[in-house]
């Protein structure tokens, strides 16, 4: 990554957390690689500006996620996967982080291609791979810690929330066909964390079979790998539509 001058104007964003504020000892092995998927064109919000570059609370959406992972001493590298149109000239605010642990990569047409691009960029020491959507800017440190802990134990792990609403299946005309039992149903979120060998094998096999998935855990599940859910957070809502920005703004103002 290019090194940027670290002098900041008064109006700049707050500095990164310093190492002595980290929960982990500074000499802990940095064995985690993070892929932040920010390669979408953001068409659903109807804005010309990329959704992941819009501000939520005190900083742009993508920077929230980058800084959240940089707060951990065990993170060796964060790869921000951007659309080809922006990867060559990322916004300057992106470098208000630990630039030595940041890599900007070019996304593909499909989410899976973008994730694979990020996995391929991982340094050798990254034995755990975490995949996170930039569209979930308010991910909590607790959730990140929980999925990484599971991956260290040899399992895949995803942040998720139990379904609390009654689910209805309907036909094409909107008529209810049946009520779906929600007892064991969870809504998948990100981050999702995996032992590196597991996620690499899952992606390579998916490429071989021509499978497409919007969820990395699904690729691992198809190969029979153990993947567990970790309780996520309502803070980690996915910002896709205009109303989501307002909700995220409100959540950003509340303490985690």
Image: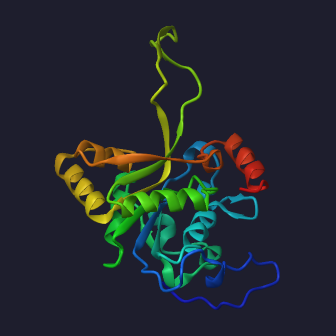
Q: Residue furthest left?
A: 208
Depth order, front residue of 64/164: 164
Residue 60: quadrant of the picture? bottom right
Height in image: 140 above or below 183?
below
Q: Residue at x 61, y 54 (%)?
A: 51
Height in image: 243 above or below 41?
above
Q: Residue at x 74, y 50 (%)?
A: 251
Height in image: 243 above or below 148?
above
Horizontal and vertical percent position of residue 217: 36, 48
Q: Residue furthest right?
A: 10
Height in image: 21 above or below 235?
below
> How many numbered tags mark residues here?
0
**Is 47 left, or right, of 206 in this rendering?**
right
Horizontal and vertical percent position of residue 237: 61, 46
Depth order, front residue of 153/164: 153
**Is 164 left, or right, of 32 in this rendering?**
right
Q: Is residue 195 visible?
A: yes
Q: Is residue 212 visible?
A: no
**Is 120 left, or right, of 137 in this rendering?**
left
Q: Quadrant of the C terminus?
A: bottom right
Q: Residue at x 45, y 62 (%)?
A: 148
Horizontal and vertical percent position of residue 166: 56, 20
Horizontal and vertical percent position of residue 82: 48, 64
Depth order, front residue of 142/85: 142
Q: Residue at x 46, y 19 (%)?
A: 181
């Amino acid at each position: 990554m290019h090194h940027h001058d670290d002098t900041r104007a008064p109006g700049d964003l707050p500095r990164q957390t310093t190492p002595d504020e980290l929960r982990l000892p500074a000499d802990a092995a940095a064995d985690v690689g993070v892929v932040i998927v920010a390669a979408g064109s953001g068409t659903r919000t109807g804005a010309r500006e990329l959704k992941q570059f819009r501000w939520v609370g005190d900083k742009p959406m993508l920077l929230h996620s980058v800084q959240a992972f940089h707060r951990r001493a065990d993170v060796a590298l964060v790869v921000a996967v951007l659309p080809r149109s922006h990867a060559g000239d990322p916004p300057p605010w992106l470098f208000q982080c630990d630039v030595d642990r940041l890599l900007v990569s070019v996304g593909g047409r499909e989410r899976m291609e973008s994730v694979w691009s990020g996995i391929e960029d991982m340094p050798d020491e990254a034995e755990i791979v975490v995949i996170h959507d930039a569209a979930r800017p308010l991910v909590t440190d607790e959730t990140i810690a929980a999925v990484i802990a599971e991956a260290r134990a040899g399992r895949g792990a995803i942040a998720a929330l139990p379904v609390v609403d009654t689910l209805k299946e309907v036909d094409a005309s909107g008529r209810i066909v049946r009520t779906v039992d929600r007892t064991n149903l969870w809504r998948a979120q990100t981050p999702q964390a995996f032992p590196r060998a597991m996620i690499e094998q899952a992606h390579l096999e998916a490429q071989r079979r021509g499978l497409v998935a919007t969820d990395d855990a699904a690729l691992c599940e198809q190969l029979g790998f153990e993947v567990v859910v970790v309780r996520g957070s309502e803070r980690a809502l996915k910002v896709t539509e205009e109303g989501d920005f307002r909700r995220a703004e409100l959540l950003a103002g509340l303490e985690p």
